[in-house]
Image (spheres, coloured by chain):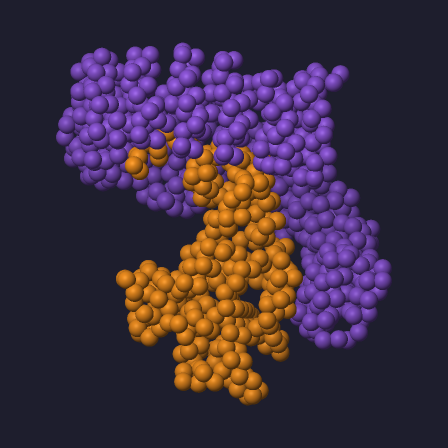
Amino acid sequence: MASLFTKTISLKKEFTIEPEEFAQLRDFIYAQSGIYIADNRKYLLENRLRNRLKQLNLKSFGEYYYYLQYDAGRKQELNRLFEVVTTNETSFFRNPPQLKVFQDHVLREVVEAQRKAGDRRIRIWSAGCSTGEEPYTMAIQLCEVLGAELPGWNVRITANDLSEGVLASARRGVYTEYALRTTPPEMIRKYFVQTDGNYAVREDLKKLISFGQINLSDRMQLKRVERSHIVFCRNVIIYFDDEMKKRVISSFYDNLLPGGYLLIGHSESLHNISRAFKPTHYPGAIIYRKEE
Amino acid sequence: MQDCKKIVAALQGGGDSSDIREAAWQAGENGCQEAVPALAGLLASGNLGIQEAADQALRRIGGKATVEAVIPLLRSDEAPVRNLAMDILRETGAQDLPSLVGLLHDEDDDIRIFASDILGSTGSVAAVAPLGEALLRDPEVNVRYQAAVSLGELGLKDAARYLNKALGDEEWVQFSVIEALAKIRDDSSIGALAKALHKSSDLVASMIVEALGEMGNVKAVTMLMKHLDAASTALRNKICKAIVQILGGKSLKLLSEAERERFGHYLLVALTDEDEAVQDAAMTGLGFVGGEKASAEVLALASGLDPDRDHDRLVLAVDALAGMGPTRALELALEGDDARPAQVVVDVARRLCSAPLCEAMKSVFWGRDRDLQREIAQALCVCARPEDKPFFLEVLGRHEDGTVLKTALEYIGALGGEGVGELLFGFLEHPYDDVKEAALEACVQVGGQGLDDRFRAMFAEQDPVRRLMAVYAMGKLGVAGHVDEIRAALDDEVPDIRKVALESFGDSCVDLGQWLPAIRERLHDEHREVRLTVVELLGHCEGEELLPCLEEALDDEDDWVRVRAVEALGRRGAEAAVPRLVEIATGTNTLLALKAVEALGAIGGKTAFRALLEVLDAEDPELQAAAEDAVARIQESGEEEL
């Protein structure tokens, strides 16, 4: 029976994280992922991991730290931890003003420049793709811009995330109505197939995207990503400390082809992080561009 | 070094920008001092990517060489290059202070301003005297201004004597001097600021008052009180805030009655100031000098606050209102139509538990919306007055909201008394789980033969949830009185019931010896959770006879059951278990080894000590550290001779 008491009477302990346990876990997470949990997010870590501790029947956050290092299930747990420390709040066509600028300016300019150069390749990197809504949205926008010409183009969207869990979901490409809450209805009709009350991304769209795990704190791993015309990294660098932000943004700069574009989350900024990009202001969006 | 030479060559080789960026990155990573001049040269590069890579590399390399190479760029005609140089020097300047101090005597005003600015970021006490001299002697007002800002940024007490003297400078410099003094908070500045207050413009006076408030030195209070009557309303409000800041609430009560009355009057005016910080200070102050009018005014202000956005301010207001005690204004608000003031009053009433407010809450309860009813019920439950029993019984009979019912059950359970058992027991059939749980806890608290009989009968029922509740309650009411039922529960088909039956021994641990065979059997339960509960129980209760069972658990198939057994043996100082623990501590399972090391440290003794010395050589740093701690623990406990 799913006893009410297993959740109430028997396990009434409430965990709090001790300062040294927080420091241990923070350093561990930073070393594993480059994600820095600031002091003011301590309660978030505590709240989000509390249930994991209960499920694992652990007595303290210190034990959880041991679990992450030594338990037979540590690898799976590390993925769960990554899911916990990165909020995967996302949806298709998230932040429409920015995506409008992406489609009407960035994509069209890249397509036009490639056309002029006689090079029909387009490479986009979605670094921190979560459950796939962002790269699929970009794929849809590319289809919209290229239209019937698409088969004549060599397009690849490289979509990476730290968490294997979210990548598995991204590869499946099946979403609830909630994930499509900001998607124009005509786009849903055009690019999704309804199955059992959910929405599956069209197979030809999936083929444009290559999903894979990446740890943004691993410079050498980033160097291996094919050079891109556009890098999307929205709501990811908020998890890093300034030093790590600088390193990651610097890697994006190196990855971008001359004249390439960087798009970050609308609440994020490169202020005090990088001066290498030229920012261009559009209504509702700032786009960063590498020099030609 | 060869690598650095290659890096320098790549930096100067005029390759493509990505090669130069990579070389710059390598220079930073390898700390290549000899690359510094080339990197400094690249700061003026037209390519922003190269410029940034050089910038980051120089910050990483740092040192005297970097400072010396970057200083000349302060004279660049290009503002972005100058700004970049300043930014790098703010981070690295402390590594070559003399070079920066030398710039304070430069002929160029701008260079002296830049140097003053950079020195403020060095965090060095050696920067104080040069900056102090610049503050007092430099002919350029902007240098003096910047020197004061930087002294404030450094925040070192040594700076106070320079800043105190500079209070007579022109107004522009005074601003930064006062801000700096507020940051430094040196006692010597109180008199200087007070003196300056007499001859300052309203604007500067206002800054001085704020600074005195932030500095929190009680010596300033008399002088501030003297200024109250003559000051303009805006300045007076600020003075009120400063006095409250300095004295805190409690000390306000030490003022003479006449002073309190005068101050209370001014605080009421300050409550209407447009600055929220002034309003907050006024609320805090009024909480201690109080009165009926103040209660009404603070309540009005609190009622306009947004509970989410203004949470902290609301807490402050409730504190203040509670400090003023029960007033007619609070009672009237409860009776009024407006929900917000009533909610605030309920929060206050929960703190005061005064009879008039409790009676007023009860009298308005049934006419209020559900949210306020919940809060009223909780407030009355917290107050726990016996005379509210009829009210809560009525709530249990009439109300349908789960939260309100839970609160009433909690109250009745805590109050106890005859005739409530049947009522409480009835709530064990409530459709909401949390209400059931509250009722169960209340039943346990009330106890008595009648309820005991009911739980015994309940245990015979088919529904596992009912049986579970019965076992939980019987365990809490005492295992000794329910031997047959608990024994049967230990063999129940439902693992949760077996687990709860085991937990029932945990409260008293009495007679555990006689139960040992039955409990030990559960060490081989098919469910891990049940086995874990056994180990927890055995570890929690005293008794030598329990230790062999814990040792038996060391053979469990589940790591965490074994971990708990190891911990329990360590906690109990089980010397007989040392050989097994040594085996585990030197074994291949690191998680268990860590726990065994901790346990050995707790148990102590020669065998444990020697085994721990062996673990000090372990490859795993965590294990090594744990062994070091364990060895230290044994040594501290007086076993050094080991």
Q: Residue furthest left?
A: B398
The residue positioned 43% from the left and 27% from the top of the image is B524
In this rendering, the answer to whether B78 lies above or below B157 is below
Residue displayed at 33% across by 60% down: A176
- Toward which corner of the image does residue A151 lie, by quadrant? bottom left
B88 is higher (above) or lower (below) than B528: below
Query: Quick one: B87 or B221, which is closer to the camera?
Result: B87
- Measuring 63% from the left and 52% from the top, which residue is drawn there? B172
Q: Is residue B121 left or right of residue B11?
A: left
* Residue B239 versus residue A209 in the image, above or below: above
In the picture, the quarter occupied by the C terminus of chain B is: top right
Identify the colour of chain A in the image. Answer: orange
Visible in this render: residue B116? no
- In this rendering, would B147 be left or right of A48? right
Q: Tell me where residue B126 sits by quadrant.
A: top right
Q: Colour of chain B?
A: purple
- Residue drawn 60% across the image and 17% down it: B576
Image quarter where the N terminus of chain B lies is bottom right
| x and y, in percent, of residue A22 in the image | 55, 39
| B610 left or right, relative to B579 | right
Foreground pick, B567 / B62? B567
Q: Is residue B165 above or below residue B285?
A: below
